[in-house]
Amino acid sequence: MLAPLNAAMLEFGITTPARQASFLPQVGHESGQLRYVRELASGQAYEGRADLGNTQRGDGVRFRGRGLLQVTGRANYAACGKALGLDLLAKPELLEQTVNACRSAGWFWQMKGLNALADAGDQERVTRRINGGVNGLAERLALYAAARKVLA
């Protein structure tokens, strides 16, 4: 996982200690410390969510969170697939492959403008853009503090 993760960070400009110290804890939290590349929940909660582009029956389950930062929803899969050159609408499970899981996290990070927030050290705003709220903020901040020490 290390080589693909390093390659994704390079590809998406996550190249300074501040950016890496922000990115890695977020990836760690969202992926259960790199154990999961597919959301544990079924995705049923996303069914019919037009804000995610889930307009067809079964989209919630089909396009549940995948990758290290849990790309979720038909619209996000389409955008990610276009950016990475993958047909994720036909094969959403491609985001479960190590290289694609890492690259999708880098793409999501860049697409959400998170390098700027990482540069500013604003971990709460980083978390909100990734998670939509502050779920797991305490763990993310603890991991961030540890990463800052290691990457300083």
Image (cartoon, rainbow, N blue to C red):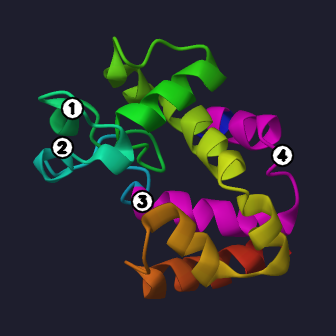
Question: Image height check: is 115 above or below 118?
Answer: above
Mark 4 and mark 3 residues within 8 Å of each other at the beta carbon: no
Mark 2 and mark 3 residues within 8 Å of each other at the beta carbon: no
Mark 3 and mark 1 residues within 8 Å of each other at the beta carbon: no
| Residue type, numbered disc 2 | Gly
> Circle 4 is placed at which residue position?
13
Mark in front: 2 vs 4? 2
> Circle 3 is placed at which residue position?
30
Label of residue 48 in the image: 2
Question: Which comes before the other along the chain, label 4 or label 1?
Answer: 4
Residue 139's image quarter? bottom left
Q: Position of residue 80 (x, y in %)?
A: 55, 30
Neighbourhood count class around disc 2 (C-alpha, 10 Å): few under 14, some 14–19, many 20 upward: some
Q: Nearer the viewer, residue 112 or 142?
A: 112
Residue 55's image quarter? top left
Determine if the magenta segment contains residue 70. no
Give the residue at x 82% y 66%.
Answer: 116
> Circle 1 is placed at which residue position?
59
| Residue type, numbered disc 1 | Asp
Determine if the magenta segment contains residue 19. yes
Between the C-alphas of marks 3 and 1, the distance is 21 Å
